[in-house]
Image (spheres, rainbow, N blue to C red):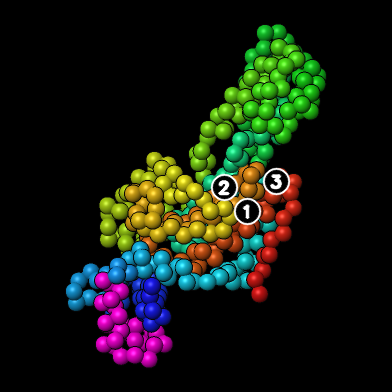
Amino acid sequence: MLSQRSETILKSIVAQYIVKASPVSSGSITSDSELNVSSATIRNEMVRLEKEGYITRPHHSSGSIPLDKGYRIYVDTLGDIKLPAAEQRMVNHLFHQVEGELDGWLTLAATLLSQMVQNVALVTKPKTDACQLRHLEVISLQDSLTLLIIVFQGAKVRQQLIQFEGNITQEELKSIAEKLNDTFSGLTRSEISKKMEGLSPVEKKIIDCLLKEMEAEDNRQYVESYLDGLHYTLNQPELVHNHGQALNLMELVEQRHLVKSIIPSKMKGQGVQVVIGKENETESVHDYSVVISQYGLPGEATGTISVVGPTRMQYARTIATVSYLSLILNLLVAKLYGKEIHVEFISE
């Protein structure tokens, strides 16, 4: 366990390195910290911190830079961080300009987050443990060809063509859709499968098509995501001077592997999680930190909102921004599901 003095020195090193992106000397710590100790004492403490794996020196004569272990102490001692009230109001205003539609909200969240923290922002669409039918419609196109429109909980819409053996009027299709909605609305695929007894051949064909779409939806993990701000991260000094690291990040994005690489296998419920460097489960992102939060309605539909960037990251600002945007998305998803939750928007 670090002494108070060692922790103060370590936090000063981390804070300065985050801003300057260059090794931190003992002299700059002396002028930065409130410690009333000599430069020699600070140098001795820095040697101890290096031996214990909190910091390292790129060259013997240079200053120090934090390691993952040092960043972890810094993050864990940040305390409660909130986005300034003026920025909360700005965020609220921008979301009020977007029509009540999930894709628009998530696109805005990714764009806004990346701009505010100057790193990659990634937002995944809310996903239910098992998708539920909200509503279906069947529309006659021509003769025996019809269009099945499926709306899942969370406002996801899927369409599928169905060819019947004989002609069916639009009035008949409307009546069938009303019956199926009354019977199956709000149910999961497994629940619908148990209630198919007594369906007519036409109704069964519609439900078979519905079940295939529901199966595909249940198997669709992390495919639908919203990413913005790659250029911000690629312009960070760490990636400008390390082409291999930059190419690795671009490959993860282009091959759509980034989202699978950064989401922990066990999210700790709602609230912001910070995963630093080699704490990440996937080796391909060991050079990065991830600030991530789940949002939505636990047990009904949840997504994630996250930031990916070098371990030298503005943690306080990033945590505060991710936290606030996840609160906004909580409120918006609750609206989609007809629920009401209270969100404390403006911090005093």
| Magenta stretch prevailing secondary structure | helix
Judging by the rendered image, the residue that carries numbered circle 3 is: 336
State the residue in front, 143 or 21: 21
Judging by the rendered image, the residue that carries numbered circle 1 is: 329
Judging by the rendered image, the residue that carries numbered circle 2 is: 303
Between the residue at mark 1 and the residue at mark 2, the CA separation in whole angstroms equals 9 Å
Residue drawn at point x = 59 percent, y = 39 percent: 129
159 relative to 270, above or below: above
In the rendered structure, find residue 134 and report the number of the disc placed on it.
none
Determine which quarter of the picture holds residue 54: bottom left
The single residue placed furthest to the top in the displayed view is: 166
What secondary structure is marked by label 1?
helix
The segment highlighted magenta reads 26-51
Between the residue at mark 1 and the residue at mark 3, the CA separation in whole angstroms equals 11 Å
Q: Estimate the x, y position of residue 124 in percent, counting from the top left.
A: 53, 46
The single residue placed furthest to the front in the displayed view is: 1
* First of labels 3, 2 by sequence position: 2
What secondary structure is marked by label 3?
helix
Q: Indicate the amino acid at tag 2.
A: Gly
What secondary structure is marked by label 2?
strand
Magenta-span inclusion, residue 36: yes
337 relative to 114, above or below: above
Q: Indicate the amino acid at tag 3.
A: Leu
State the residue in front, 129 or 87: 129
Magenta-span inclusion, residue 150: no
State the residue in front, 108 or 306: 306
Q: Are marks 1 and 2 in contact (CB under 8 Å)?
A: yes
Judge the density around disc 1: few (<14), some (14-19), many (≥20) Cα neighbours within 10 Å: many
Quarter of the picture containing the C terminus is bottom right
